Amino acid sequence: MITDDDYLYYVDRALDGMAGIVAGLGDRLANVRPPLPGANSPYALLTHCLGVVSYWAGELVAGRPVVRDRDAEFDSAGPVGPLLDQVAVVRARLAEDVGAAVPGAGLRGTPPPAYLGPDRELTQGVALLHVYEELAQHHGQMEILRDAILADQRKAEHHTADQRTATQNPGATP
């Protein structure tokens, strides 16, 4: 229905958006979990997305064995640079996997129920659609995470500045 290039264009937009957010936040803030119930850090969310791409496109579509610890993806943390390097590696493999996919063919494995994929019989094309679904929704989620982290950061900086002013000028109102 769509070309490989069209599919990869939209997948790349989501990956680029998330990679840009993580890069923009830097090592410290990319690893912060905002004060929202069940929130992940942008770093962990991007790690999870790379796991999604590697597993669903790499193992289930291309048939390449992938070792994945889905739960650990959400606890991951670290410097941004190596994670961004991994984005480039996963993106290149995905382009190869998409090029070799047979959209109407069955998967080359069965996803565990814990992976929360579509609850229906899947083809390689549907698995690739699921990859895009995950990347698009997590890109939007990461935009919200970034905004919450930066708002919290600004609030903390403002509070620190107010405290500094109060200490230097005990009679002043912040």
Image (spheres, grey):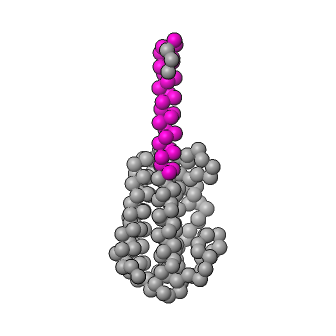
Q: Is residue 84 above or below residue 7?
A: above
Asked if the magenta segment contains residue 167, the reply would be: yes
**Relative to residue 10, is residue 56 drawn left or right?**
right
Residue extending farthest bottom: 105
Q: Residue at x 50, y 88 (%)?
A: 105
Q: Which residues are magenta?
A: 144-171
For the stretch drawn in magenta, the main secondary structure is: helix
Question: Closer to the camera, 73 or 12?
Answer: 12
Q: Position of residue 1 (x, y in %)?
A: 41, 82
Residue extending farthest top: 171
**Relative to residue 12, is residue 57 drawn left or right?**
right
Q: Position of residue 149 (x, y in %)?
A: 50, 44
Q: Residue at x 55, y 46 (%)?
A: 34
**Relative to residue 100, is residue 75 drawn left or right?**
right
Q: Residue at x 49, y 54 (%)?
A: 142
Q: Is residue 59 visible?
A: no
Residue extending farthest right: 113
Q: Residue at x 61, y 80 (%)?
A: 120
Q: Is residue 3 visible?
A: yes
Q: Position of residue 107 (x, y in %)?
A: 53, 83
Q: Is residue 133 above or below residue 28?
A: below
Question: Closer to the camera, 58 or 6?
Answer: 6
